[in-house]
Structure formats: structure tokens, C-alpha cells
Image: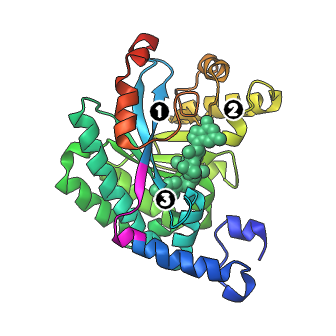
Amino acid sequence: ESDQARDRGLAYYRADQDSYSADRLTMVAELREALAQNELALYLQPKLSLTSRRVVGAEALIRWPGRDKPVPADQIISVAERTGLIKPLTRWVLETALTLRTRLVEAGHDLALSVNVSPNNLREPDFPVFVQRLMTAHPEHRNRLILEVTETSMMLDPANSLRALRALASAGIPVAIDDFGSGYSSLSYIKQLPATEVKVDRSLVTDLRSQPEDRVIVQTTINMCHDLGYQVVAEGVEDQATLELLSRMDCDMIQGYVLVPPRPIDAFVEWLDAPERARQA
Ligand code: C2E
Ligand code: MG
Ligand code: MG
Ligand code: MG
């Protein structure tokens, strides 16, 4: 299978074609065990409003210490997607995210919390109902839990994705289009999405200052998204000068190492509460 097909999630598992198949099978078993034993964690990364210069949200990102070394999030997710484990995994992520949000609120930080959802989840017939039930059980999180879905993944199954996202949106669950500008999309599809937020992919953001072409694309994306009624978040901002440039370009929010890399909730709250940050704001 081509890398392109794999990227688009069109691949199916063929043990005979996978040179890492033995490793992969071990990893599947270990991941299943890790999920059952609650060995996975969600790290948090802040989202900063460029207008208020305040932290307005956070993104939850999966972490797994693994048996001998940490396994990258992309790899955890691709293994989970190929084996059906993505269904219980995402449900664990959603439930855990709500627990974390409760802790943030208790610590005095009423932040919106974003979680990433796989296209496979949007194809589960009972996914919207699962999320709706979660919101009914925890109404305090309504409109404060944001689901991130990548544009490319939605293009795999546009009709079903749209149906699922509309069901979620009508139940008070905001949707963000993740990794925008990194892959396949259709502008006529984008305009129909019940999204509140578009996240511009890191690949267009990181070298924004040195890449005039990226600046054209990002500025045009910001303008277009605003005209369509979406808020814009730039991902992967690594330095203060890029943050200020994005502010001048009228970008709404940023994430990136310029603030802090993703960290466990206690360290995240510590960072939020640090006196240096209060002075910065
Ligand atoms: P994403 O949702 O686009 O998340 C942003 C990624 O960029 C994260 O990588 C984050 O750690 C990284 N990042 C943030 N700021 C910077 C920066 O300034 N520079 C650089 N170089 N990187 C930055 P991570 O945590 O490795 O996650 C990778 C991808 O894995 C995510 O991309 C998302 O697509 C997926 N993912 C992570 N957690 C979950 C999850 O719980 N469920 C699902 N379905 N997917 C997840
Ligand atoms: Mg994301
Ligand atoms: Mg992204
Ligand atoms: Mg990504």
C-alpha cells in the first residue's frame, strides 16, 4: 500500500506486509493491557487567546510510558485504529478529559478542554449518543469540551462525518477542524461543517517568519475562516516573534512550545499559577 493510502487511513492491516508485525502485535497486546490497567495518561497543553493574552483552553494529548520507552501519540493512535481499540480508547480519553476539567475548575481555571477524535469514532453509530449521555451526566462541561477532528480524516467519509458532527454540535459539543492545511480538504465541504474553530497545521506555522509563502497561506486562511464564522488557532508556535506576527495577522489563539510543551495536570496547573505568568499577562 502507498504511504498516501496509509495516511488517508485507507490501509488495512496485512501482517505479511508489515516488517514490524511481531513488534506491532506485541504493542497491540500491551496497549490493550495498558488501557485496562489505566496506564495511559492525558497531558495538557495550553491555548492562549491573542486578544486577551490569557489561557482560554487546553488540549488533552495521550501519553503512554510503554514497556521500555514512551510510545509517540501518533503511533498509539494508529495501532488503536487498526485494531478496533480506538473505540474504548477514545471513550477513556473523553471520560478522563472530563475528570481533568473538573480538577481544573476546582483549581480555579474554568478552561475549555479539547480532545482529539479519530475518524473511526465518527463512524461508530452510537458515538454521538455516547457523547450526549456523557454531557447529560455532566452538564457542567456542556460547550466546554471541544472535539478535534482532522480535515483529512473527515474527507475519508464526508457524509457520515458531517452527520456525526451535526449530531454532536446540536448536543452542545463544539467541533474543531484540526491540522488544517496539511492534507486533503475541500473548501465546499469545510463551509458546511458545524465547527467553531479551525486549527492551522504546525507545518504552516513553525517557520512563518522565514517563509513568505506560508504567510500568504496562513493570512488567507485566517481571513477565510473569519468570514465563515470560525475562530482560528495556530498550532506549533515555537517563539515569541511568531506569536506576535500571528497576533498582527489577526489570528485568534495559539498553541505551541513558546508557551509550554504538554504536561501532566499537576505540572500544568503549577504552570498556570506561576507568578511569572501573572506578570506576563
Ligand atoms: P495534534 O492534535 O495536531 O496535536 C498537536 C501535536 O503537536 C502534539 O503532538 C503536540 O505535542 C505537538 N506540539 C505542540 N506544540 C508544538 C510545537 O510548538 N512544536 C512542535 N514541534 N510540536 C508541538 P503529540 O502529542 O505527539 O500528538 C500527535 C498527534 O496524535 C495529535 O496531533 C493527534 O492527532 C494525535 N493524538 C494525540 N492524542 C490523541 C488522543 O487522545 N486521541 C486521538 N484520536 N488522537 C490523539
Ligand atoms: Mg489536536
Ligand atoms: Mg493538529
Ligand atoms: Mg496532528
Find out whether residue 44 is within the magenta segment: no
Looking at the image, residue 257 sits to the left or right of residue 95; the answer is: right
User: Which segment is the magenta one?
Assistant: 34-42
For the N terminus, the image quarter is bottom right
Comes first in the chain, label 1 or label 2: 1
The percent coordinates of residue 130 (x first, y second) are 30, 65
- Residue that carries the numbered disc 2 in the rendered image: 218
- Residue that carries the numbered disc 1 in the rendered image: 47
Badge 1 element: strand
Q: Given the image, on which type of amino acid does mark 2 rest?
A: Val
The percent coordinates of residue 126 (x first, y second) are 34, 71
Comes first in the chain, label 2 or label 3: 3
The percent coordinates of residue 134 (x first, y second) are 25, 58
Question: Which of 120/80 is in front?
Answer: 80
Badge 3 element: loop
**Neighbourhood count class around disc 2 (C-alpha, 10 Å): few under 14, some 14–19, many 20 upward:** many
Looking at the image, residue 211 sits to the left or right of residue 139; the answer is: right
The percent coordinates of residue 154 (x first, y second) are 57, 60
Extreme residue in the bottom direction:
16
Q: Is the residue marked 1 within 8 Å of ligand 2, measured from its CB?
A: no
